Amino acid sequence: MPTKLLIFLFLLLAAAWLSSCHNKEANKIIIQGHVTEYGTDAPIQGARIYLWCSNGEIFGSNGTSFIDSLVTDVEGAFHIEYLDRELCGGVYLSAFKEGFFYKSDIDIHSGVNDLEVMLDPEAWLRILTAPDGQTNYDHIGVGGDFSFETSAFEGTKEHVYITRGNRDKIVGWGPFNDPSINFIDTIYVLGGDTVSHVIHY
């Protein structure tokens, strides 16, 4: 094969290789979006976004490794960019703000990631069981997102549970010795608030 042809082929392959490397390095992972409150869609300022690697390729360790974090602005927005080669193959996000439940396992892919992250506000449901003779049940069971039982001889009792706010909660109760009798109460629990509900029996 003539020398000039060999040189031409070599230069052509070298140019293709350099172009491939350049394109690979230029590929970006763009992570952006908003963090809002469940039930109100209000933006959450100051929420912390955590970036994780799950396959151990970063920092040379196995398991999950922390990569970076950022904080949402007044509009609940966040934005960060990386080159593909800067991150491992199994990247995911989590989000947290005090007063809200932790959100995890938000998968990230190559290219643009437009994310709408919704956090559940913390709320508290306060259940009072008052044996005041309205049903004359001696022993009742209470269920829903939680469960407990109580007896009339114990008097009025208080139970407080943390739960996800801005939604209805179902509280069922009835005599412990007869599951066929069941009363259902629906209580709306506002995020960031404590709602009290009394069960008279």
Image (spheres, rainbow, N blue to C red):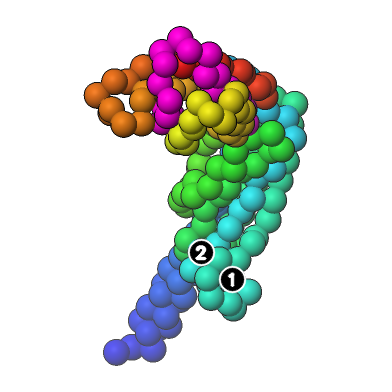
Mark nearest the camera among 1 and 2 is 2
Left of 147 or right of it: where is 194? right
Q: Which of 10 and 32 is in front in this view?
A: 32
Residue at image point 43% right, 68% down: 16
**Foreground residue, 59 or 99?**
99
* Picture coordinates of residue 39, whole percent (x, y): 54, 19
Label pair 1/2, CB-CB below 8 angstroms? no
Q: How far apart are marks 1 and 2 (CA)?
A: 9 Å
Percent x, y for residue 111? 48, 47
Secondary element at image label 1: loop
In the image, 36 versus 80, the foreground residue is 36
Q: In the orientation shown, which residue stands out farthest toward the left?
A: 180
When the figure is inspected, residue 171 is found, relative to residue 100, above or below; the finding is above
Name which quarter of the figure residue 59 lies in: bottom right
- Disc 2 designates what residue? 54
Q: Is residue 143 magenta?
A: yes
Q: Residues within 10 Å of mark 2 (few under 14, many from 20)?
A: some
Q: In this view, does 48 lie above or below 68?
A: above
Judge left or right: residue 108 versus residue 182. Answer: right
Q: From the viewer's perspective, is 142 left or right of 27?
A: left
Residue type at mark 2 is Ser
Q: In which quarter of the image is the N terminus?
A: bottom left
Tell me which amino acid carries mark 1: Ile
Q: Is residue 131 visible?
A: yes
Range drawn in magenta: 120-146
| Residue ID for mark 1 | 58
Residue name at image x 42 percent, y 16 percent: 136
Helix, strand or loop status at disc 2:
loop
